[in-house]
Structure formats: structure tokens, C-alpha cells
Image (cartoon, rainbow, N blue to C red):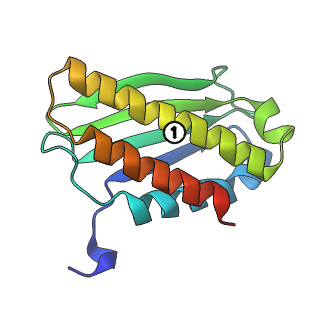
Amino acid sequence: MASGDIKRIISIGVQNGDKEASKVTDFSITKLRRCMADNCREVYSNEIREYSIVFRIDGEIWHWNFEGCQKMRRSKKEKYITVDIGIPKDVWRNNSRLELEKYISMHVLSAFEGFIRKFKKDKIEIKSEQLIFDVKKALTQFIEND
């Protein structure tokens, strides 16, 4: 299978609250997708095929009024787990790109730690140490590379 044929284990979606939020955050979100795809390729559990993160980035038109991880959901039938990560306006407006990317990294790591807690609670076998290692490697690449 060619590298382009590999199904991404981690998917990242975004809902921006306005065009300015999109303009400021698009580069970082695209870079995060690439870093996660480059580093998180393993099947960490036979019961989970996809780990999904959806960023809700507040703007002038739409705003979700929460920060960090919320609404974790798991589909046993479709074998995925997802969580929303809220980013308030003041985070993307008042910080440098590096500070924004550190903020994003902190919440992505928190999301994966939450996924693992949920798996343990649900008694799902998972290679949690490998998953966290790969996620941390991806997040280090995300912050260090431009």
C-alpha cells in the first residue's frame, strides 16, 4: 500500500466562527493534521479505527462559549471516538502563532488522555503508551516546525 493510501487514524475537523478565525488558525490546523498523519499510523486498538477531534473556534458570527475538551462521544458500531475542543476568540486573537500552537497542543494531548481514560473505563484494550508516545511526537513536531 502506498503511503498516500494509508487511512488516517486521526481526523481533525474545524468549525470557525468567522472568516478572521479561519484566516488566523487555518495554517496551524493544517500543520497539525500533517504532523498527526506523519506520526500516528498504528492501529492502537481493534475496537477503535478513528480518533476524531473537532475544533470549535469562536468568532463574531458563531461562538460556542467553551474552552478545552467537551462532548466526548464513542461509537461502538462505527469504531470511532470524538471530542470537541473549544478555542475562545481571545486565544487566537491575542497570541502569537507559536503560543496558539502550544495552546492547541495542550488541548490535543488532554483529548487523547481523556480518550484513554474512557477506554480504560469501558475495558477496551489499547496500546495507550504507544498512542501517547506517538501523539507527543506529533505535537513536538507541530510546535517545533514551521
Q: Residue at x 82, y 31 (%)?
A: 90
Res. 123 image quadrant = top left
Marks counted in the figure total: 1
Image height check: is 130 above or below 141? above
Res. 16 image quadrant = top right
Q: Residue at x 83, y 48 (%)?
A: 96
Image height check: is 34 above or below 85? below
Q: Does residue 20 appear to the left or right of 38 in the view shown?
A: right
Q: 18 or 138, which is in the foreground?
A: 138
Q: Which residue is mark 1?
A: 108
Q: Secondary structure at mark 1?
A: helix
Whether residue 117 is visible to the viewer of this picture, yes or no, is yes
Q: Does residue 27 appear to the left or right of 60 in the view shown?
A: left
Amino acid bearing label 1: Val
Q: Quadrant of the N terminus?
A: bottom left
The x, y position of residue 127, in whole percent, is 22, 42
Q: 136 or 11, which is in the foreground?
A: 136
Q: 95 or 125, which is in the foreground?
A: 125
